[in-house]
Image: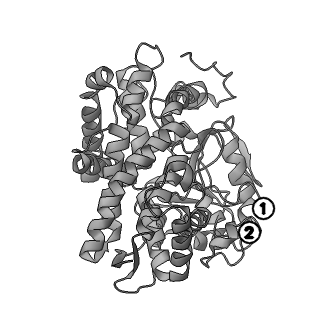
């Protein structure tokens, strides 16, 4: 395997180069306090705390309130960072596609820098922390682990885990779905990513701790959350490193084994890079698919007619276990999944840093500006969607295709060079789960409640989503 051809680097502000070194693989983040006083919005400690809590507790409702108050481009504070939020679909799409002006790597290194003392010290790291040629190298290495044949094998492995879990829930007649589905998806992840069945609890705890670090308002060892994040990342490194030699000897059909075999004997990735590559994929997948499934369970429990439509289609595709190829015929299920991600978006934004002074709509912003392109706000904009607060999966039908009116309207997995690597896997897992669930049972909320959207840290429906389950 050869390295991707190096890019001629874009025009980068000199002070950024002095601070972070190679912008394609930055070793550290940089402060976000740039002069944005000319933009609408708010600043200061109180605004930062209020905005952070608003995102976490009220999710998209808070983002839309800010959008109405300040307009499609505004400054604020979030989790200790000075940020610019962008909710204009043209700009959201433009920022995602323009990797000569906007750096994804520098944004995510700013979030996670300090948790991993060896970040970008290996030959490769997580695709989150890389841009340009190194980013293409990382995705090239990952590609065979996410090709259709690999995803089909993961689909079968997930199905084998989903089936007994759903049967246990049916036997009990109830399930606290939000907690149950997260633990179940971690179990699936340990199998399809690591090829083990006995490390789910340890993996879940380490990933929870690692993910919560960037939201700590204090990022040093005085913060218990920050200390847990460092410990969680260290645990993940140790879990993976201890298995590399054995996987190279025995092989396997899990992602880690595929990458161990693919990386051996090349100069593209060393063992440290292999570990960080896998952690990046697992961290991106953690609590994302399970969050979407929890939100979808709430919507189906409160809209039983759609549950019936999905069930009818599921039976038509197959009454027993179905294949990955057969699952692609679940068109109604796909529309409901898309509408879930629109109403209860899992990722609120994609993050970027400006590599030089640039124009952002009508505003000029300086190099280093931290931008959050609000895909979640765009997906709720009443100027773009027909009754955007209404649950209406048929908006994704071929006849209506509201999501295709503009390239920036519906980007739940991002777009451009940094499109989510696990997008097709997440969609396949969702189809596998709902086919099993709906061909075995019907369900409703134990206690009806009016839910709202939250970010903790992934976007998810509020409440426990406690379900009453009845066997068909």
Q: Which sits earlier in the primary sequence, circle 1 or circle 2? A: 2
Crowdedness of circle 2 by 10 Å Cα count: few (<14), some, many (20+)? some
Query: For residue 384, which numbered disc appears in the image?
Result: 2
Mark 2 residue element: loop
Q: Is residue 172 left or right of residue 283?
A: left
Residue found at the far bottom of this picture? 448
Crowdedness of circle 1 by 10 Å Cα count: few (<14), some, many (20+)? few
State if disc 2 and disc 1 touch (CB < 8 Å).
yes
Query: For residue 282, which numbered disc appears in the image?
Result: none
Q: CA distance from mark 1 to mark 2?
A: 9 Å
**Toward the viewer: 133 or 324?**
324
Q: Which residue is mark 1?
A: 405
Q: Is residue 118 left or right of residue 61?
A: left
Mark 1 residue element: loop
Q: Residue at x 34, y 84 (%)?
A: 446
Residue 54 visible in this rendered orientation of the protein: no
Quadrant of the rendered structure where residue 464 is? Answer: bottom left
Q: Nearer the viewer, mark 1 or mark 2?
A: 1
Q: How many marks?
A: 2
Residue 294's x, y, as percent?
A: 42, 67
Q: Quadrant of the C terminus?
A: bottom left
**Toward the viewer: 120 or 178?**
178
User: Which color mode does the image show?
Assistant: one colour
Q: Residue at x 26, y 67 (%)?
A: 168
Residue 95's x, y, as percent?
A: 68, 46
Q: Residue at x 69, y 28 (%)?
A: 10
Residue 444's x, y, as percent?
A: 40, 81
Residue 279's x, y, as percent?
A: 38, 38
Question: In this rendering, is residue 55 above or below 282?
Answer: below
Question: In this rendering, is residue 324 above or below 40?
Answer: above
Residue 246 visible in this rendered orientation of the protein: yes
């Amino acid at each position: 395997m050869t390295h991707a051809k190096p890019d001629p680097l874009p025009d980068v502000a000199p002070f950024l180069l002095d601070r972070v070194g190679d912008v394609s693989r930055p070793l550290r983040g940089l402060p976000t306090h740039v002069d944005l006083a000319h933009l609408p919005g708010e600043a200061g400690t109180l605004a930062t705390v209020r905005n952070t809590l608003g995102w976490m507790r009220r999710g998209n409702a808070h983002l839309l309130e800010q959008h109405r108050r300040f307009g499609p481009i505004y400054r604020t504070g979030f989790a200790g960072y000075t940020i610019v939020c962008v909710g204009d679909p043209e700009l959201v799409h433009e920022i995602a596609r323009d990797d000569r002006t906007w750096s994804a790597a520098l944004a995510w290194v700013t979030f996670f820098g300090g948790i991993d003392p060896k970040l970008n010290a290996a030959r490769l790291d997580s695709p989150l922390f890389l841009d340009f040629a190194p980013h293409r190298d990382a995705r090239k290495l990952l590609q065979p682990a996410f090709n259709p044949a690999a995803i089909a094998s993961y689909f079968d492995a997930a199905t084998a885990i989903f089936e007994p879990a759903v049967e246990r829930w049916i036997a009990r007649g109830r399930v606290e779905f939000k907690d149950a589905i997260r633990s179940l998806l971690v179990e699936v992840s340990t199998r399809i990513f690591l090829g083990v069945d006995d490390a789910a609890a340890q993996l879940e705890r380490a990933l929870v701790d690692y993910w919560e670090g960037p939201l700590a308002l204090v990022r040093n060892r005085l913060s218990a959350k920050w200390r847990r994040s460092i410990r969680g990342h260290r645990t993940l490194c140790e879990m993976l490193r201890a298995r590399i030699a054995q996987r190279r000897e025995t092989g396997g059909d899990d992602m880690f084994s595929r990458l161990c075999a693919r990386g051996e004997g090349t100069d593209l990735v060393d063992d440290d890079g292999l570990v960080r590559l896998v952690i990046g994929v697992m961290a991106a997948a953690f609590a994302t698919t399970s969050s979407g499934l929890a939100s979808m369970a709430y919507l189906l429990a409160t809209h039983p007619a759609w549950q019936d439509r999905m069930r009818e289609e599921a039976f038509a595709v197959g009454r027993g276990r179905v294949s990955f190829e057969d699952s692609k015929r679940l068109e109604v299920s796909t529309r409901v999944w898309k509408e879930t991600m629109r109403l209860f978006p899992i990722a609120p934004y994609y993050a970027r840093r400006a590599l030089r002074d640039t124009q952002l709509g009508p505003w000029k912003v300086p190099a280093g500006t931290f931008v959050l392109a609000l895909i979640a706000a765009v997906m709720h904009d009443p100027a773009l969607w027909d009754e955007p607060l209404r649950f209406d999966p048929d908006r994704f039908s071929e006849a209506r295709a509201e999501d295709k009116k503009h390239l920036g309207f519906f980007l739940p997995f991002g777009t451009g060079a940094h499109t989510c690597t696990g997008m097709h896997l997440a969609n396949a897992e969702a189809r596998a789960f709902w086919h099993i669930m709906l061909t075995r049972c019907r369900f409703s909320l134990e206690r009806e409640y009016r839910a709202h959207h939250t970010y903790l840290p992934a976007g998810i429906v509020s409440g426990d989503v406690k379900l009453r389950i009845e066997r068909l």
